[in-house]
Image (cartoon, grey):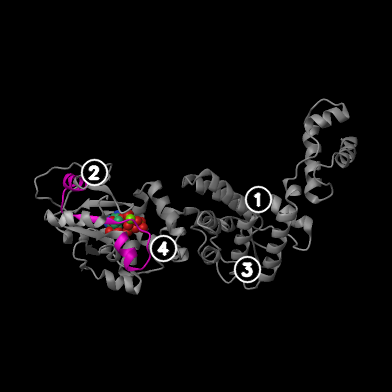
């Protein structure tokens, strides 16, 4: 029988060491959200943790050792056991990269938010709550441990972590904590792009992303994190809209159906960026209303630059930009050709595109649900029944055309093939109908 988590806990007790469940694992368990790997804090030095685990035959990972962390495989999951942090360690051992502490109290005081600064004694089950973390968990509040601005100055990443937790947990940020974030916001410029991107991405994938986004704006963090979005707040729209461009964007992010776990990133980023082109193209129309002519094209360009800077995975970035470019398409659900064209232009991503269009509509003053229901049904039917036509493949290849017309290859081939693929997509020509394709080709080549 391999040693269990209980055996590991008992080994700490037997050797006179402390072991505390801390951080996200405890927070999420107290909230009733499972699924977080265990994080432990201990007074034992990393060498001792490693020895205790090894004596029980437990697998360990030591890559984090110089930062004080040993990974231990317990009851089927990897847990992290980290030596107390502090300002000083009196044990006389010198570690180059961290300073160890001597007490759990000191360790907890260095943590970022009260809900992350709880500890549960792994041996006795006693919960240590020095900063009112349990009350904040119950009330749904993100509150800095200690003086907020000072804690954010020590490590500005905490600002983004706080916004991210607000979105992930759907929690409120306590007033002084929010003020501390606003007072130190320009320090966000000192963080690496990678860390900023990670936090923004996690924030957007949370259960209430609009909450985090609204606070990003409120503390003045847009210019430091998503500068392309900074002109959105205050950019008013026409009477069909209840909100300015920013309010509409936040509402769209909250409204979009996140789809499955593999869809949520693309869908939320697309919702966030779909109108990024609006402030740049806004103009007054002859009827006196605001117009946003071709904002989807400008938006695609701006989104591309932004996503490159964030180093978003290329595959996601390409898809997000495509969906932005196409979000104003409005096919007629009763017209099969129009639906086919819509699906073809979305390059197989019509479900994402429809999710965006539906969410985009959610904050308009008029209700377009019936249209989107009809469009969804029409797309599902066309995607099922017209799969071959949607591939829009020319029934004749370049070689076929050279043979039929006895002409050397040249730009004319591309022209004819494009006409033939369009004819297949439009239903004018059945997929694979070579005879029909030749007839159409003759009319084109005759003219060419
Ligand atoms: P998740 O794993 O879901 O991101 P978490 O709270 O476990 O949430 P980690 O980054 O894994 O976050 O950090 C574990 C714990 O370490 C946190 O709960 C917090 O107590 C502490 N911590 C992490 N980063 C910081 C920081 N920048 N400043 C202060 N304490 C931090
Ligand atoms: Mg964690």
Does 389 appear above or below 185?
above
Pointer 4 or 1: first along the chain? 4
Pointer 2 or 4: first along the chain? 2
Which secondary structure, mark 2?
Answer: helix
Which secondary structure, mark 3?
Answer: loop
Give residue 278's mark. none
Give residue 238's mark. 3
C-alpha gap between disc 3 and disc 4: 33 Å
| Displayed quadrant of residue 167 | bottom left
Q: Position of residue 222 (x, y in %)?
A: 44, 57
User: Does 403 sit left or right of 301 as displayed?
Assistant: right
Q: Position of residue 439 (x, y in %)?
A: 90, 40
User: Does 11 sit left or right of 332 as displayed?
Assistant: left
Frontmost of labels 2 and 4 is: 2
Would you call the spot at circle 2 few (<14 residues within 10 Å), some (14-19), or many (20 or more)? some
Q: Which residue is mark 2?
A: 65
Q: Residue at x 23, y 64 (%)?
A: 120
Pointer 2 or 1: first along the chain? 2
Which secondary structure, mark 4?
Answer: helix
Frontmost of labels 3 and 2 is: 2
Give residue 168's mark. 4
Frontmost of labels 4 and 1 is: 1
Pointer 3 or 2: first along the chain? 2
Would you call the spot at circle 1 few (<14 residues within 10 Å), some (14-19), or many (20 or more)? some
> If the picture is divided into quarters, which one holds ligand 1?
bottom left
C-alpha gap between disc 4 and disc 1: 30 Å
Which secondary structure, mark 1?
Answer: loop
C-alpha gap between disc 1 and disc 3: 32 Å
Q: Position of residue 259 (x, y in %)?
A: 55, 60
Q: Nearer the viewer, residue 200 or 135?
A: 135
């Amino acid at each position: 029988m391999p040693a269990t988590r209980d055996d590991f806990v008992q080994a700490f007790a037997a050797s006179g060491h402390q072991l505390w469940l801390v951080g996200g694992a405890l927070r999420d368990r107290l909230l009733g959200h499972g699924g977080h790997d265990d994080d432990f804090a201990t007074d034992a030095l990393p060498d001792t943790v490693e020895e205790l685990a090894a004596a029980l035959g437990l697998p360990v990972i030591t890559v984090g050792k110089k930062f004080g962390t040993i990974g231990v495989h317990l009851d089927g999951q990897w847990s992290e056991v980290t030596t107390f942090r502090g300002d000083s360690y009196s044990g006389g051992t010198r570690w180059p990269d961290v300073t160890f502490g001597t007490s759990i109290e000191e360790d907890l005081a260095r943590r970022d938010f009260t809900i992350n600064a709880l500890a549960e004694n792994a041996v006795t089950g006693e919960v240590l709550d020095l900063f009112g973390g349990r009350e904040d968990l119950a009330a749904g509040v993100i509150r800095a441990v200690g003086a907020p601005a000072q804690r954010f100055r020590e490590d500005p990443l905490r600002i983004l972590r706080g916004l991210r937790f607000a979105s992930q947990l759907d929690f409120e940020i306590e007033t002084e904590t929010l003020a501390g974030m606003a007072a130190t916001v320009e320090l966000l410029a000192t963080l690496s792009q990678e860390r900023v991107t990670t936090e923004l991405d996690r924030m957007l994938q949370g259960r209430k992303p609009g909450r985090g986004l609204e606070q990003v704006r409120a503390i003045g963090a847009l210019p430091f994190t998503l500068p392309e979005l900074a002109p959105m707040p205050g950019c008013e729209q026409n009477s069909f809209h209840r909100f300015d461009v920013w309010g509409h964007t936040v509402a769209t992010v909250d409204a979009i159906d996140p789809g499955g776990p593999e869809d949520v990133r693309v869908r939320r980023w697309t919702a966030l960026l779909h109108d990024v082109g609006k402030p740049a193209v806004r103009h007054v129309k002859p009827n006196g209303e605001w117009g946003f002519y071709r904002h989807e094209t400008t938006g695609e360009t701006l989104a591309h630059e932004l996503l490159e800077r964030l180093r978003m995975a290329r595959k996601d970035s390409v898809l997000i930009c495509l969906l932005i470019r196409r979000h104003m398409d409005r096919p007629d659900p009763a017209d099969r050709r129009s639906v086919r064209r819509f699906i073809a232009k979305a390059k197989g991503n019509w479900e994402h595109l429809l999710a965006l269009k539906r969410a985009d509509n959610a904050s308009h003053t008029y209700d377009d649900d019936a249209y989107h229901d009809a469009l969804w049904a029409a797309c599902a039917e066309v995607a099922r029944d017209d799969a071959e036509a949607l591939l829009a493949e020319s029934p004749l290849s370049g070689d076929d055309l050279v043979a039929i017309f006895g002409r050397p290859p040249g730009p004319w081939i591309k022209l004819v093939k494009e006409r033939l693929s369009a004819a297949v997509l439009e239903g004018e020509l059945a997929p694979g109908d070579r005879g029909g394709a030749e007839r159409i080709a003759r009319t084109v080549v005759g003219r060419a």
